Image (tube, rainbow, N blue to C red):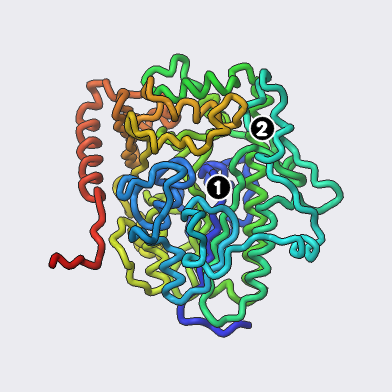
Amino acid sequence: MPERTSRPHIVLLNPDQWRADAVGHLGDPAAITPNLDRLAATDAVSFRHAFCQNPVCTPSRCSFMTGWYPHTRGHRTMFHMLHAECGEANLLRVLRQAGYHVWWGGKNDLVPAQNGYSEDCDIRFQATPDDYRRWGLTPRPNLHSSPEWRGSPDGDNFYSFYAGRLDKGDEPIYCDHDWANVLGAIDAIRNYDGDKPLCLYLCLSYPHPPYGVEEPFHSAIDRSALPPRRPAPESWEGKPAILKGIAERQRLQGWMEDRWAELRATYRGMCSRVDHQLGLIVHALKEKGLYDDTALFVFSDHGDFTGDYGLVEKTQNTFEDCLTRVPLVLKPPEGVPVQPRVSDALVELIDLPATVFDFAGIEAPHTHFGKSLLPVVAGERDDHRDAVFCEGGRLKGERHAMELGAKSEQTPQGLYWPRLSLQSRDDGPYHGKAAMCRTARFKYVRRLYESDELYDLERDPQELHNVVDDAAYSEVLAQMRERLLTWFSETADVVPFQPDRRF
């Protein structure tokens, strides 16, 4: 057994695009997530109301790795990441500088690839042919690089992201990049020598669409147990224009419920695969004798429509709960008080670094806006925040924020064309800046170029009826606007800790 270090090991398992309600212990009768369920019952706290700060990958990751909101330093596109040379820290770099051995496997969407990764981690894992030979597995393509499943460009599956069951041949798994990174992480745990505390950052692509998964996960989901979909609004009145525009371009209006059930079940099968991979990581930690000394975080960067409102995938400037509410399960290391349960506290992903700093005894090297979750984990309280926030979009004329780098996706042949073709236009309000303030009962969205939104989540949990113009909610609207203004005032900027010389 490795020698115990003075600081706990940190394991960050970060699946991509996992909506919170596709988890068994959070109420989905069709979900198969026994490992997450077991953690919440015995060793960890699962947060029912955890929210991301932007509903797409890069802005969300830049946010939860710094404790900053996207507007604080302008991280609100897929192509603007964290620049250390501009004084932008990130959790991985802070941990490495504090003496952690940082292993990073999987997606980036965090630091500029042109700058490399040497300052952010000790090992940036990439599976080699020797790894596949040692594992006895065949490397499989990811679904973005083998799009035969899309069918005819004129068909109604072309923009659906639905691929279905993956053929793994005679092998036990479909060894795509996710599986390779999981197996690499297990190797890293088994080979850990104990010289430094370990930080393992495992960024998976699942359950990000395309929706496809191998057996046994594909067939395991009971289609008859799926909860109802949120229906598409009849006229889209009161909703942002981009939702109607995406719906028209995705061409899924003719799908019958049995086809939606297959897509939604496949997505849950993808979630089940991630849960199974979590179980393998936990087993490896226990086998190595590291589990008790490990702080384990399982969380997603944002959610997914998965058929709600007749849509698939996501948007960057709308804030429905299926996009913004994410799983967050936290197991502390031994010696840290914990009351295992599902907590109803309102929490944000920017609370992640503050909590890690608390576990590791690290003084934050920069101003941030996160709040440590340790008091909630210990069961001392469940009133963590009075409101949570999310934001996205851009200004008109802000060409550098149009994400024109994804040029292949701007054409009708691109899988993301229904969304990106609208994001890169200025002849409508499709991608205007917007910000969400959500309390336990109400959700308010301030929109720069369209009508604001206000939802009474107690009476309208599906967010179908915008009551922003209803006089009965005028007092609530004023309170929510004031809360949003206070938030912007508190988080508008960060001042560096080191002052400059004037003379």
* Residue 150: image location, x then y, percent: 69, 29
Q: Residue furthest toward the front?
A: 503
Q: CA distance from mark 2 to mark 1?
A: 17 Å
Q: Judging from the image, what secondary structure is the residue with disc 1 in?
A: loop
Q: Residue furthest toward the right?
A: 170
User: Callout 2 environment at 10 Å: few (<14), some (14 to 19), or many (20+)?
Assistant: many
Determine if residue 313 is in view: yes
* Residue 102: image location, x then y, percent: 52, 69
Q: Residue at x 60, y 44 (%)?
A: 207
Residue 257 occupies quadrant: top right
User: Mark 1 sits on what residue?
Assistant: 16
Q: Earlier in the sequence, mark 2 or mark 1?
A: 1
* Residue 33: image location, x then y, percent: 62, 50
User: Mark 2 sits on what residue?
Assistant: 162
Q: Residue at x 30, y 23 (%)?
A: 451
The correct choice, above or below, for 312 with respect to 71 in the image is above
Which image quarter is the C terminus in? bottom left
* Residue 225: image location, x then y, percent: 65, 35
The correct choice, above or below, for 453 with respect to 301 in the image is above
Q: Judging from the image, what secondary structure is the residue with disc 2 in?
A: strand
Is disc 2 in contact with disc 1, using a CB cutoff of under 8 Å?
no
User: Callout 1 environment at 10 Å: few (<14), some (14 to 19), or many (20+)?
Assistant: many
Residue 84 occupies quadrant: bottom left
Q: Residue furthest toward the left?
A: 503
Q: Amino acid at mark 2?
A: Tyr
Determine if residue 465 is in view: no
Q: Residue at x 49, y 45 (%)?
A: 57
Q: Amino acid at mark 1?
A: Asp
